[in-house]
Image (cartoon, rainbow, N blue to C red):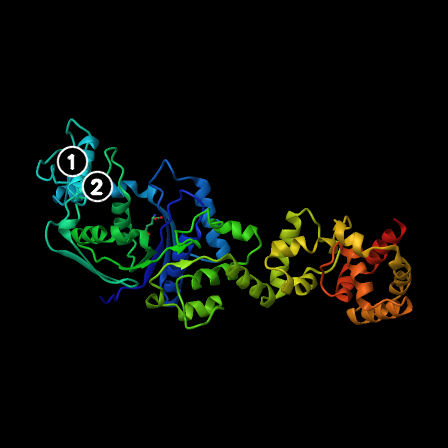
Amino acid sequence: MTNTRPIRTRFAPSPTGDLHLGSVRTALFSWLYAKAHGGTFVLRIEDTDVERSTQASVDNILEGMSWLGLDYDEGPFYQMQRMDHYQTVLNELLDKNLAYRCDCTPERLTDLREKARESGDKPRYDGHCQHRNLSKDHSLPTVIRFRNPTDGDVSFTDSVRGPITVKNEELDDLIIARSDGTPTYNFTVVIDDRDMEISHVIRGDDHINNTPRQINLFQALGATPPIYAHVPMILGKDGKRLSKRHAATNVLSYRDAGYLPEALLNDLARLGWSHGDQEIFSRDELIQLFSLDTINKAGAVFNEEKLDWFNQHYLQTLPAKNLAPLLEEQLNALLISTDKGPALEDVLKAQASRCKTLKEMAEKSKYFYDDSLSFDEEAVKKHLTSAVFPAFTDLCLSLKDLSPWTPETIKQALKTCAGTHSLSFGKLAQPLRVALSGNTISPSIDLTIQLIGRERCIKRLQNTVSN
Ligand code: GLU
């Protein structure tokens, strides 16, 4: 099917929980497709499930989108604000006899299902009320059902799955409004996709079974259905749909854990889409290269190690000045003030190759800013013996007047000190690391000393010797 309409895509989350990795990936694909074609990306909040929808979920969705830079051109539209409109369309369908009222009780419907199950048939509504012409003033509660065509097929070409055909006789008459008058998902989604002139619906393949019914509704309304692309689910390592049992699924928890939006976007894009063997994609490259026919047909497994790998790549390659405020936030979250201490950009450059996340980096960088060191007891016992104290005292003197204060001059001072005290460089460096940072892991000792700063180093060494 060719589609010459202007490209308009949408993301239509239900605010019944936090923004999930799986749904944000469909948002990303919809966003990319719109950007790639100079189209429009619409955000629509499907909040008609009043019991389960919350403002906190709406806020979480909007914040997650904003963090990832998935900006929308139109919206957010809220379905609850379109209720009057849905009622108007429901009445039109009833007037045109394209829909009808049904008073079948839940007991009758359960009974139908049971019987179908017993005889091995697919459960479906038997059309009991199809020709009863029940009116609005009927004495019993009524739902509204769409009069699904009884013969023929529904065919469409899914951009991911290929051609799909379903016989109409397999589809029963869908409930489009509940007995309290509220419209159902399959109805509102069609009305909105029609009214918002959505050209491409890119969504999770858990909706694929709804699609033939939605297409029939489009046709009854005299509207052209969009092109559909059903994206396979993201899976956990056990092959089941990704859930909290496997990993955090809330997008914002990745921000809080110190991941970069660039890394998460790159990882999500690669989960379910590929361009040769390439792994690293900038946002602009994704826009240039993304196409619906390169979405994978099989579900992809979410792998935290891979995300770590992407994150570390971006920690090492994005400009330190852009990352510095994020590192500061992470340090502040640990109650560390960065006012007194090395420039955050310098810490970033020194630590990027050693940390997977900004949170890890903050945890490993506290000692640059905070004098209350947490000592690794093992390391203290092993390395901070009084045998090195004379060297420490000596080093304090040479560091005091060292000029210029650079890793090179510091290294030279350490070498001289080690020589004077007949220590190998390592036998001086490791105790120094423990005395200055609390443990045995830090950037190279000369850089560590330079970043901690002259006064702090001298004070920490003097404290070690005098305690
Ligand atoms: N509100 C639906 C959901 O969150 C969206 C379905 C669709 O994209 O059509 O699953």
Label 2 secondary element: strand
For marks 2 and 1 on the same chain, the one whose residue lies earlier in the sequence: 1
Residue 403 in sight here: no
Circle 1 residues within 10 Å: few <14, some 14–19, many ≥20: many
Q: Are marks 2 and 1 in contact (CB under 8 Å)?
A: yes
Relative placement, left or right, of 193 versus 248 is: left
Q: Which mark is residue 220?
A: none
Q: Is residue 182 positioned above or below 237 on the image?
A: above
Q: Which of the 4 image quadrants contains residue 431?
A: bottom right
Picture quadrant of residue 177: top left
The x, y position of residue 295, in whole percent, is 36, 64
Residue 73 position (above or below residue 107):
below
Q: Of 428 and 148, which appears nearest the observer?
A: 428
Q: Amino acid at mark 2?
A: Ile
Residue at image coords 40%, 59%: 300
Q: Residue furthest left?
A: 131
Residue under circle 1? 102
Q: Is mark 1 within 8 Å of ligand 1?
A: no
Q: Looking at the picture, does residue 440 appear above or below residue 144?
A: below
Q: Is residue 367 left or right of residue 220?
A: right
The residue lying toward the viewer, choosing from 438 and 117, is 117
Residue 451 spot, x, y in % from top left: 75, 62
Q: Position of residue 147 (x, y in %)?
A: 14, 45
Task: Report, in whole angstroms, how far the alpha carbon at label 2 lies from the one at label 1.
Answer: 9 Å
Q: Is residue 300 visible?
A: yes
Relative to 73, say whether 135 is above or below.
above
Residue at x 21% of width, y 58% of height:
224
Instruction: Please give the residue where the numbered disc 2 appears in the rendered image.
Output: 175
Q: Looking at numbered disc 1 in the image, what kind of residue is underneath it?
A: Cys
